[in-house]
Amino acid sequence: MKFDTPAGTNPIDRLKVVGKATDRIDGPFKTTGTAPYANDWHDPQAKLAYGVVVGATIAKGRIASMDLGAAKAAPGVVAIVTADNAGKLGKGKLNTAKLLGGPEIEHYHQAVAVVVAETFEQARAAAALVKVKYTATEGAFDLASVKDGAKDPGDVQGSPSSSSVGDFAGAFASAPVKLDESYETPDHAHAMMEPHASVASWDGDKVTVWTSNQMIAWGTRDLALTLDVPQEKVRMVSPFIGGGFGGKLFLRSEALLAALGARAAGRAVKVALTRPQMFNNTTHRPATLQRIRIGATPDGKITAIGHESWSGDLPEGGPEAAVLQTRLLYAAPNRMTALRLVVLDLPEGNAMRAPGEAPGLMALEVAMDEMAEKLGIDPVRFREINDTQVDPEKPERAFSQRSLVACLRQGAERFGWDKRGKPGQVRDGRWLVGMGMASAFRNNMVLKSAARVRLDGKGMVIVETDMTDIGNGSYTIIGQTAAEMMGVTLDKVIVRLGDSDFPVSSGSGGQFGANSSTSGVYAACMKLREAVAGKLGFNSADAVFEDGQVRSGNRNVPLAQAATGGDIVAEDAIEFGDLDKTHQQSTFGGHFVEVGVDVATAEIRVRRMLAVCASGRILNPKSARSQVIGGMTMGVGAALMEELAVDTKRGYFVNHDLAGYEVPVHADIPHQEVIFLDEVDPMSSPMKAKGVGELGICGVGAAVANAVYNATGLRVRDYPITLDKLLNRMPDAA
Amino acid sequence: MKSFTYERPGTPAEAAAAVARTPNAKFIAGGTNLLDLMKLQIETPTHLVDVNGLGLDKVEPTPEGGLRIGALVRNTDLAADARVRKDYGVLSRALLAGASGQLRNKATTAGNLLQRTRCPYFYDTAQACNKRQPGSGCSAIDGVSRQLAVIGASETCIATYPGDMAVAMRVLDATVETVDAKGATRKIPVADFHRLPADKPELDTILKAGELITAVTLPKPVAGTHIYRKVRDRASYAYALVSVAAVIGKDGTGHVAFGGVAPRPWRVEAAEADLPRGAKAVTDKVFAGAKPTEDNAYKLKLAERTLGAVLTEARA
């Protein structure tokens, strides 16, 4: 199905199932331990062996020699695979560094071997016996010190790395009120609960990999490329994922090494990364250095806005696209943005929840707060003044929907924003109390997505698509969509996900999954409706699917009856035209945060949070709210504690466990409220929905930072905002 | 993890003897620290002596009016003990500030005293660490050291003792009771129990090989307001950047020890006379001779301000 004109009225608009707050249909499997996560798989046909990954212990250089003797002789060892004996390996399109390193070492904990043994414990013990001698070479590990050598990275995510409108330099120079500030965000780890894990099993020249991966089609393609086999020889199965946040968008070492280990061992092999390996072996959100310049007239009209960002990655890697939202968020006649990239020899950078916008807004929305203060204008009002309904760089492109101001106004009212005090003036016992806000902004992407739906003789509707559920509720909204389309209740729908044998979906990432994959199910269900109507002798245009019946005029037939002679199967994909090019599709919100800062120790604790979101139709308000509060929680982490600590001499992330890399715990997160504006976006898809899973994090860091400023009168421009950055400037604690 | 053998002896002296006679043996109680370290091959014992079955799990009054806490009393139970809550509030609060509920249910009094540093270089066997591998060097001194010691460290090691419970025990003048392989017992003031690294950072404590902790005794309760204030980057389940254990009397005199700043709970009794003069007078003396790194110099200011907050709280 082509989607190239705005959606009109369609069966989804009935909202009998879609749009209702619905418990997740996979919940009982999870609470009863019957949802098989990757590491839970046991191939009943084959006696499983276990692989443990050996990671490089230098950041850059070469393997001088490798002694496998002791490891091979260790009890239970079945096989050891290294780059020397793995055979010819290619590289996945979306991998920067090789997943099996050697002799070249590109980053710390790059895999150099997998040791396969009869038991996990034997494999782990033997892995420690692999003796590798390295010749280390100098590397670049400190972004700030190599920033001046930055290069233009070329196009980023289909957009140019730089943009320029009007005369930024002239307008900024002559602006009556100016801000020119620099901001730093550190490297972040996805730190999801479930480590990367895969079980691989070969049947002849065909390999099946039970894994934890957000993007099945990317994964099978890249595993085939890396193994140098045709893609149809690779099957990937990933029905349940214990968190990904972008860390499981790509083929990673454990899947490749499970496949290689299984080939070498001649039997199924299970490989899970250790927690320390997750920090340096996989991908992370790269650190940024950002410079923002804003010029405005005294009445608060922005006349010039400039945003530059520097980040690093391995050779042939890409930048953190931290300036992209600045091209779209506020009006201004004169504008510039630029992304710059340096080579760093740290582990490879890549997407983490709201790549680009998350760190970009951590800078931009603090700059907006600072500018509002310079202008003496309320921060909410300042954003209203500079709202735009068109793409500021290409004014001929209107936003499909843009309710930013409505989000901010409603948020301000609900939060009691008018009670915000002057910086450093509000005290509650030992706490200095402050409020902060920020705009939330994240683009709405749409991707082709296919599904297969089957009606059986019992009236059950079975949906199959390689879409993944990363813990966010995909199963449920896909089930709701099929139920709505076929006029049945949710318990009449069976959803099967995450298998490369199913039609190729959008996958889960970039908050494109919910809207795209349900639209694919919509397309397949439209076909199924036609087939059912035909079977029952209805004109499909007139047929109404409702209450498990198909109705036209006076005739009413149970849906199941259509399949009495055999299952009816329909398959289709949603393919998006250029509505996302003629119109700018984005999602919006307002974040409001109250913090307390301990007057003596400068400890910062969040007291309450509110997000107001405008994301088109909300398919399942319950799971959408969970997504937003999860994003808000992650935003608090980014604001206050999350930082991969770089050892700039040794070239790796030092705090490589969950004791060292702190994320918020329950005690850090107080009352969170989420409000969704009641809106639909017919430009986005037949579902009229948009992404929401990443909007929740966008702007939160800045709202927290602005609240800390309001509480203390002290501005911190390098994240995370920890007490040591405030302490020397705190007033005497009386 | 390396393969190991395991035994459950019948008495404390047998346990001590079992560890003493087996090279590279270790006691195991709650296992909350040791098992993690074994999985990472930071600790590689070849033999474990399980002391969980030895009793040693009672909290009893002493003839001197104090409390004798068995080595195997779990942190949760100790924190909840009515006598501890009433008379040694600083200890109960310190325990509850540590780890998580699940860990406190397993962790024991003796094991908590023996928990090892959380220095990130100690936790990566590819990195130089004199504490883990004597003579290999110290990566932390010129590495990432925000969490690490500002005082009491040496040129070989700047690791901190990470715990909370022992900081409270230090301010309470607790005594560690042990038994050795020959059945001989001794009493070690908690002040002397953890050693400074000097040129032997691999030795965290003065315990001899095979010497088993059987109890910790607390002297008679000290009157005053008992406060344990732990400062950290998140609200729970994090190691202290700085902590203060204090017992402060109505007249402003009292006792104070600091955690998160040194290789052992850090207390300078001579500075306590200055408590009525305020925090700075005390911390100037307590931290005289401190050698912070650029990353952790903030701890000196933080210790002063945290003590200030504690004294304010005690007055309130």
Image (cartoon, rainbow, N blue to C red):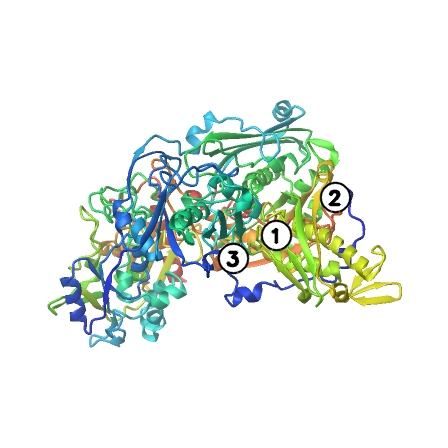
As helix, strand or loop, the secondary structure at mark 1 comes to loop
Residue A669: which numbered mark, if any? 3
List the residue tagged with mark 1: A502
Callout 3 touching callout 2 (CB < 8 Å): no
Q: Mark 3 or mark 1: name the one nearer the start of the chain.
A: 1
Give the side of residue A535 with respect to residue A102, left or right.
Answer: right
Cα–Cα span, label 1 and label 2: 20 Å
Q: Residue A86's spot in the image, x, y percent?
A: 39, 41
As helix, strand or loop, the secondary structure at mark 2 comes to strand
Look at label 2 and name its amino acid.
Answer: Lys
- Judging depth in this view, the residue of A78 and B108 nearest the camera is A78
Q: Residue A41's spot in the image, x, y percent?
A: 47, 59
Name of the residue lying farthest toward the right? A554
Res. A476 image quadrant? bottom right
Give the foreground label among 1 and 2: 1
Name of the residue lying farthest toward the front? A204
Q: Do dots 3 and 1 share one subunit?
A: yes
- Judging depth in this view, the residue of A111 and A23 nearest the camera is A111
Residue A562: which numbered mark, if any? none
